[in-house]
Structures are given as structure tokens and as C-alpha cells.
Amino acid sequence: MGNSVPDPVNSVRTRGNKDPIAFGAYSAAPPRSEMDDYDALGAPVNNWLFFADETTTSLDPATVHGAFITGEREADRILAFLRG
């Protein structure tokens, strides 16, 4: 891409702290779940639909840091996909 990065075609951003039901809630693993379940939630779908959120990592679930690092992870995955 060089130094020129095109503008996004579309994006979605949620504001969980404004949601009257969730109101900034974070994930909690149900009984008998495993940490790998978080990673499964973060798996891309056909290299077309990508997920970034604190619920998609077993490294730092339920944390702002987990949300941040998964955003970086998905940006890397998308770039790898675009580069072929």
C-alpha cells in the first residue's frame, strides 16, 4: 500500500456503554466452557468476516487490553488477506 492508504468503504462501531441492555458489559465464560472457546469466536469466516473484541481471545478476555489486541490481530489478518 505504500504511504497512501485508501479510505474505508464501510465500518461499524458499537458503543456498548450507551446500550441500555448491555451498558458496557464484558464477557464471562459459562460453566464448562474452555479458554479455546474464546479463540473459536475470533476465527474469521471465509477470510471475509473478521471479529475483534475482548470475547475473541483466550489471552486477555473481559479486558480493554483484550479488545485492543484483537483489533490489532484482525487488522493484521485483513492486511494479509488483501496482500494475498
Image (cartoon, rainbow, N blue to C red):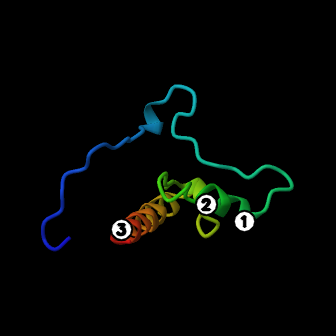
Of the image marks 1 and 3, the number of the one nearer the N terminus:
1
- Real-space CA distance between mark 3 and mark 2, rounded to the nearest whole angstrom: 24 Å
Q: Identify the element where label 1 is drawn.
A: helix
In front of the other: 46 or 50: 46
- Residues under numbered marks 2 and 1 in contact, where contact means CB atoms less than 8 Å apart: no
Q: In this view, does 67 lie above or below 12?
A: below
Answer left or right for 15 relative to 57: left
The residue at which mark 1 appears reads as 36
Outermost residue on the right side: it is 32
Tell me which residue sits at (44%, 61%) in the image. 68
Q: Which residue is drawn at 58% across and 66% down?
A: 60
Tell me residue 22's x, y (percent).
57, 33
Q: Earlier in the sequence, mark 3 or mark 2?
A: 2
Label 3: element kind: helix
Q: Residues within 10 Å of mark 1 (few under 14, many from 20)?
A: few
Q: Which residue occupies the extreme front position in the image?
A: 84
Q: What residue type is labelled 2?
A: Pro
Q: Mark 3 vs mark 2: give the one in front.
A: 3
Rendered-image quadrant of the N terminus: bottom left
Say which residue label 3 marks: 79
Outermost residue to the top: 20
Q: Where is residue 52 in the image (x, y as percent from the top left)?
A: 49, 55
Q: Nearer the viewer, residue 80 or 13?
A: 80
First in residue order: circle 2 vs circle 1? 1
Instruction: Find out whether the residues at labels 1 and 3 contact each other: C-beta distance under 8 Å.
Output: no
Q: What's the residue at 44%, 67% (across, down)?
A: 77
Q: What element carries label 2?
A: loop
Q: For label 3, count other residues whose C-alpha is less than 10 Å away and answer few (under 14), some (14-19) or many (20+).
A: few
The answer to whether 2 is drawn above or below residue 35 in the figure is below
Q: Residue 61 carries which label?
A: 2
* Residue nearest the viewer, comparing 82 with 39: 82
The Cα–Cα distance between marks 2 and 1, rounded to whole angstroms, is 11 Å
